[in-house]
Image: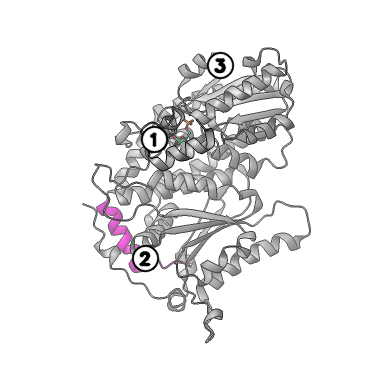
């Protein structure tokens, strides 16, 4: 039985007091791994907090749950299957890792063939997918591919035709490959976008339009039925969850745009974080410490949100990627055995880009009545070639915000009073390359896993999205037994 009593009783002193009392606090609550510095010292974790969470982890059998994940045991119990994204990095069971390596080899062979113009000239990649089949690849290409001139990549997820049309206007259909990314190959938005992209190729007189289509899926039969040739289907294992799938063939556009060596580096960086997570004691384990701090704020202080600010334009898509990873994984109302959760589930993940966010939402963070644990993600080596002043200003702003949130500033004038004692963690990457980004994303995956494991929930299913899909279908069929408001909206939009 997971015992929260010691954690619930935690009552740490103010952050500034923690620093005053312990001159070694920064070192004690920082971890360096895989080219990333994680600083948790501006959170309220202290020795007592750490001990309490270590006790909680023991009572929740965290180590055994982690080992079961890496061993490829069926930890996704509601769907009766294993969870093998770590095998994509070679860190799963021997069998799962060998299977993933075989599928990677297939992906690499197709990339080589495309580079050798087996599909004719290719300059543009139109990647169609949604959720986990889009957010990961989009983030990778946006973060790492800015200077890559191998191919233009567009990731289209929204069913709103405006998104697709924009790409049709920009790309030459005769030099485009259409990549349909869908684990299930049934997602309605993706399939409609795929149909429209195929029609675009046909309308423009592309010879053999199906020959320009590639499918990334765990359901190859459905892709074949849709019309994709077996040789251009890059399968991945059913046990790789959508939001954990960028390491599989779902990462295809990134591997194309950045080159295979970069894609391999991404996997190696993630593998380094996997080993760190698997082999390091909790007090020095970055994903565990991060999850402990997350749980302290969400469960003990009852914070309803947590915010991540990327102080680097190249990481601007990180907050939306994390929203799916964290909320689709741990936004659950029941534990793994189906009993109602008697604690809050995952907090709402939100965030933005620094320094923009400072001039929009930081007012609330500094003086609002909500306590929001904040995370800063920054990179020591900048991505621009402009005056040093740009990047140093960016970094100094990130660091200053963390300091201001913590120390605050007392004033008799309430409007000018900063209460302080507001927590933040800072994640500082040496540089933004494929290896480091791989490690960072694996860190977030494991942090999410730890939170789920300690709450006793299954982070690997997502039944919560099904009802909306069913209702959308019903609405499309006329809305028959839907409520009056929804029927009225349908009537207004579509008439009789
Ligand atoms: O609707 C939610 C979801 O199932 C996500 O979990 C998933 O990443 C996304 O839809 C896309 O699914 P698919 O890859 O099967 O098209």
Instruction: Give the residue at mark 1.
Output: 466
On the image, which quarter does residue 116 sit in? Answer: top right
Q: Mark 2–mark 3 contact, CB under 8 Å?
A: no
Disc 1 crowd, CA 10 A, few/some/many (<14, 14-19, 20+): few
Residue 461 in view (yes/no): no
Q: Name the chief secondary structure element in magenta.
A: helix
- Report the residue that reaches farthest toward the bottom: 412
Instruction: Give the residue at mark 2.
Output: 301
Residue 337 placement, left or right of 473: left
Residue 118 placement, left or right of 343: right
Question: Which region is colored magenta?
Answer: 43-60
For the point 29% across and 44% down, the residue is 64
On the image, which quarter does residue 253 sit in? Answer: top right
Q: Is mark 1 within 8 Å of ligand 1?
A: yes
Q: Position of residue 73 (x, y in %)?
A: 32, 34
For the point 67% across and 40% down, the residue is 145
Cα–Cα gap, marks 2 and 3: 52 Å
Magenta stretch containing residue 301, yes or no?
Answer: no
Q: Position of residue 396 (x, y in %)?
A: 65, 66
For residue 165, above or below residue 47 = above
Q: Position of residue 472 (x, y in %)?
A: 44, 33
Instruction: Give the residue at mark 3.
Output: 228
């Amino acid at each position: 039985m997971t015992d929260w009593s010691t954690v619930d009783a935690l009552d740490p002193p103010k952050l500034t007091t923690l620093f005053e009392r312990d001159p070694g606090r920064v070192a004690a609550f920082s971890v360096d791994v895989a080219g990333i510095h994680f600083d948790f010292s501006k959170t309220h974790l202290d020795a007592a907090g750490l001990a309490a969470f270590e006790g909680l982890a023991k009572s929740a059998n965290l180590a055994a749950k982690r080992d079961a994940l890496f061993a490829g045991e069926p930890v996704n119990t509601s769907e009766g299957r294993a969870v093998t994204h770590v095998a994509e990095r070679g860190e799963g069971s021997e069998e799962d890792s060998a299977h993933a390596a075989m599928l990677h080899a297939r992906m690499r062979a197709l990339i080589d063939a495309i580079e050798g113009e087996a599909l004719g000239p290719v300059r543009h990649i139109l990647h169609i997918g949604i959720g986990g089949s889009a957010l990961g690849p989009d983030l990778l290409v946006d973060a790492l591919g800015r200077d890559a001139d191998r191919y233009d990549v567009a990731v289209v997820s929204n069913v709103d035709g405006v998104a697709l049309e924009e790409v049709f206007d920009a790309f030459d259909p005769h030099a485009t490959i259409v990549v349909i990314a869908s684990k299930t190959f049934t997602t309605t938005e993706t399939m409609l976008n795929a149909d429209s992209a195929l029609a675009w190729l046909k309308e423009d007189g592309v010879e053999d339009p199906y020959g320009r289509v590639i499918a990334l899926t765990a359901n190859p039969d459905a892709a074949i039925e849709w019309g994709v040739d077996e040789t251009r289907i890059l399968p991945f294992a059913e046990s790789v969850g959508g939001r954990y799938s960028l390491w599989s063939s779902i990462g295809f556009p990134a591997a194309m745009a950045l080159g295979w060596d970069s894609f391999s580096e991404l996997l190696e960086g993630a593998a380094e974080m996997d080993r760190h997570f698997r082999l390091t004691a909790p007090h020095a384990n970055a994903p565990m410490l991060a999850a402990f701090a997350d749980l302290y704020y969400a469960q003990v202080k009852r914070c309803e949100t947590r915010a991540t600010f990327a102080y680097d334009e190249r990481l601007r898509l990180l907050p939306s990627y994390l929203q799916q990873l964290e909320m689709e994984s741990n936004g659950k109302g029941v534990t793994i055995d189906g009993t109602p959760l008697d604690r809050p589930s995952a907090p709402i993940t939100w965030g933005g880009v620094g320094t923009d966010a400072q001039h929009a939402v930081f007012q609330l963070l500094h003086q609002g009545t909500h306590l929001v644990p904040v995370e800063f993600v920054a990179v020591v080596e900048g991505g621009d070639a402009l005056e040093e002043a740009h990047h140093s200003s960016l970094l100094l702003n990130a660091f200053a915000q963390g300091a201001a949130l913590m120390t605050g500033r007392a004033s008799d004038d309430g409007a000018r009073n900063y209460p302080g004692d507001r927590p933040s963690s800072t994640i500082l990457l040496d540089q933004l390359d494929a290896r480091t980004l791989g490690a960072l994303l694996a860190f977030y995956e494991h942090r999410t896993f730890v939170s789920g494991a300690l709450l006793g929930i299954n982070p690997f299913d997502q039944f919560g999205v099904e009802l909306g899909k069913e209702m959308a279908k019903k609405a499309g069929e006329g809305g028959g037994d839907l409520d009056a408001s929804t029927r009225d909206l349908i009537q207004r939009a579509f008439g009789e």
